[in-house]
């Protein structure tokens, strides 16, 4: 007796399975490997522009510790529903001080070619910690974060240390950049490595 030919999957079922597999893979990738973020403010100018879209490596810090100079995305300690992006300036055990806008790390002036100071005035420490801060020692498991646009960055000078558990990942690539003032892409920024 001849067997009936095996019925193949319907096109609807094949598409449904493919979509479900793609969604599961996308969720796994977004949760554990890479996530996209958009830069909403100018606190990291000139390194990151408003309208830059970046990719963040979410698994790298499972294998290595964050280092000074890393640009990371993290949960804002005052409101964990918001993501911030800043540069690590000091790691656990470092002594940090800001004197007249100059950062001193372990009692030595820090050379930071990427930093800009847009405001020529200096704010007194009694008014704001922006230009005079510390000295402080970074406690274990914490980091001191600062924006590259030093005069216009809400960072560790204002809200304290960042605990390593709040780190989401390390920024590594600009995959898209949109200049909303000129209503056009910034083609030269696309594909640029973040450092």
Image: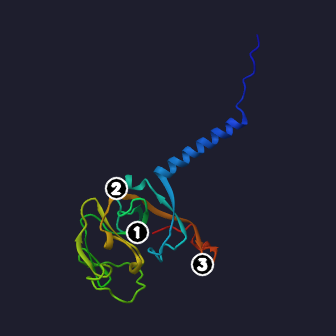
Q: Residue at x 46, y 63 (%)?
A: 171
Q: CA distance from mark 2 to mark 1?
A: 16 Å
First-in-chain label (3 vs 2): 2
Q: Quadrant of the N terminus?
A: top right
Q: Residue at x 46, y 57 (%)?
A: 57
Callout in the foreground (3, 2): 3
Give the structural element (helix, strand or loop) at label 3: loop
First-in-chain label (3 vs 1): 1
The answer to whether marks 3 and 2 mark residues whose Cβ atoms lie closer than 8 Å is no
Q: Which mark is residue 86?
A: 1
Q: Residues within 10 Å of mark 2 (few under 14, many from 20)?
A: few
Q: Is residue 99 above or below residue 162?
A: below
The answer to whether marks 2 and 1 mark residues whose Cβ atoms lie closer than 8 Å is no
Camera-side residue of 179 and 78: 78
Q: Which mark is residue 181?
A: 3
First-in-chain label (2 vs 1): 1
Question: Residue 95: image x %, image y %?
Answer: 24, 71
Q: Is residue 77 left or right of residue 40?
A: left
Q: CA distance from mark 3 to mark 1?
A: 24 Å
Give the structural element (helix, strand or loop) at label 2: helix
Q: Which residue is mark 2?
A: 165
Q: CA distance from mark 3 to mark 2?
A: 36 Å
């Amino acid at each position: 007796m001849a067997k009936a030919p095996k019925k193949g999957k319907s096109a609807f079922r094949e598409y449904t399975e493919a979509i479900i597999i793609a969604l599961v893979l996308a969720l796994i990738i977004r949760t554990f490997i890479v996530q996209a973020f958009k830069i909403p403010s100018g606190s990291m100018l000139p390194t990151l522009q408003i309208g830059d879209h970046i990719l963040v490596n979410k698994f790298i810090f499972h294998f290595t510790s964050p280092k000074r100079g890393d640009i990371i995305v993290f949960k804002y300690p005052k409101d964990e529903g918001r993501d911030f992006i800043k540069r690590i300036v000091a790691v656990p055990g470092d002594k940090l001080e800001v004197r007249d806008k100059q950062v001193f790390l372990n009692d030595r002036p820090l050379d930071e070619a990427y930093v800009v100071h847009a405001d020529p005035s200096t704010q007194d420490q009694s008014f704001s910690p922006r230009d005079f801060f510390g000295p402080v020692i970074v406690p274990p498991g914490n980091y001191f974060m600062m924006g590259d646009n030093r005069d216009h960055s809400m960072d560790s000078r204002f809200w304290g240390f960042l605990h390593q558990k709040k780190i989401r990942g390390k920024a590594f690539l600009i995959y898209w950049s949109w200049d909303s003032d000129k209503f056009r892409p910034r083609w030269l920024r696309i594909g640029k490595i973040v450092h």
